[in-house]
Amino acid sequence: MGVLATFTPQAAADAHSPWGYYGPVKGIKYKNRATIADSSRLYASTTAAKNGSGNVPSGYLGALARLYKGSTLCASNGYSYTNGPANSLSVPTLGKGCGKGTYHSYGVTKAYTGNGYKAVYTFKSPSVNHRSLTAGPAAPGHGTAPAWPKNAEGETYGSGLEATSPGNAPDLIRAYTTGGEVGYVKRAELEDEPAPASPREAVALQKRLAGEDRRIAVYDTDGTTVLGDFVVRRAPVSALTQGR
């Protein structure tokens, strides 16, 4: 497997989720997994891959990584896509985490359907205890999403770590502000980014937006009172690992 671009920090403690298998999507079978690592910095990464040898065409694979401290979102990427034929794509979160505590990685991958993209969650990674440099037990599988509580506006709120698919996450997802306060980001704002309809559009999007940050508001449970902001980062090309 050759490497087009690499990001390989040496982890003092890291842990992988089991591979999740899905497809066929447009005749291709895929797999994905989440990784949590603690080295010179703490990061989560998500890997999307073809299930088997050989490459898929440019733009067929997409992925984003999300890092959770406890059950609260600490860091998230926008989607990155392959910019050439590839067997796999790995995307890390950026930054240094949200302080001492227990962390998980829980990401999302995309596969081209012939008419847009299918989004699929990874399994949750085992936990890593940041600054004690130890890996915890394996996380459970997807399980069943809880009955989310609702605010006065009828918006559901809770932890994105408890969602079982991109379609059943709460309207308000618990997250840290850049100042370390706990509140909620709106799922619609967290996921508000261009949705390519084709691999050509995905590759163009990757070239245009790689390395770009986007700030969104963090709210109280009412979905109105602003407590601070959250930064959605899109990994630069130098941080992506594409295998073939």
Image (tube, rainbow, N blue to C red):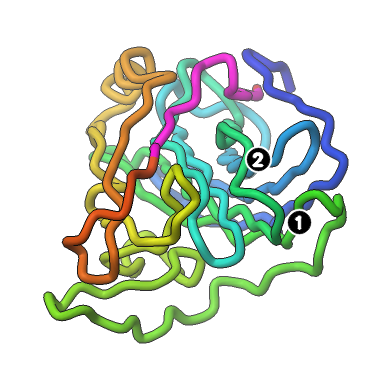
Give the numbered dot on residue 128. 1
Residue 219, x across and y down, in percent: 28, 58
Residue 116 coordinates in the image, percent (x, y): 26, 40
Res. 185 image quadrant: bottom left
Badge 2 density bin: few <14, some 14–19, many ≥20, Cα 10 Å: many
Residue at numbered disc 2: 43
Q: Is residue 154 magenta?
A: no
The three-letter amino acid code for the residue at tag 1 is Val
Q: Is residue 158 left or right of residue 47?
A: left
130 above or below 238? Answer: below
Q: Nearer the viewer, residue 77 or 96?
A: 96
Quick one: label 1 or label 2, which is nearer the N terminus? 2
The residue drawn where x is 68% and y is 47% is 35
Question: Residue 113, which numbered label?
Answer: none
Q: In terms of secondary structure, where does tag 1 sit? A: strand
Residue at the (77%, 58%) spot, across then down: 129
- On the rendered image, what quadrant is the C terminus found in? top right
53 displayed left or right of 66: right
Q: Which residue is rendered at x = 83% and y = 37% of the image?
A: 11
Relative horizontal placement of residue 194, taking residue 141 as reference (left or right): left
Range of residues picked out in magenta: 231-243
Mark 2 residue element? strand
Please indicate whether residue 46 sits to the left or right of residue 219 in the image: right
The amino acid type of the residue labelled 2 equals Tyr
Q: Is residue 53 among the parts visible in the rendering?
A: yes
Q: CA distance from mark 1 to mark 2?
A: 10 Å
Q: Is residue 8 above or below residue 64?
A: above
Residue 52 occupies which quadrant of the picture? top right
The residue depicted at 47 percent of the width and 81 percent of the height is: 144
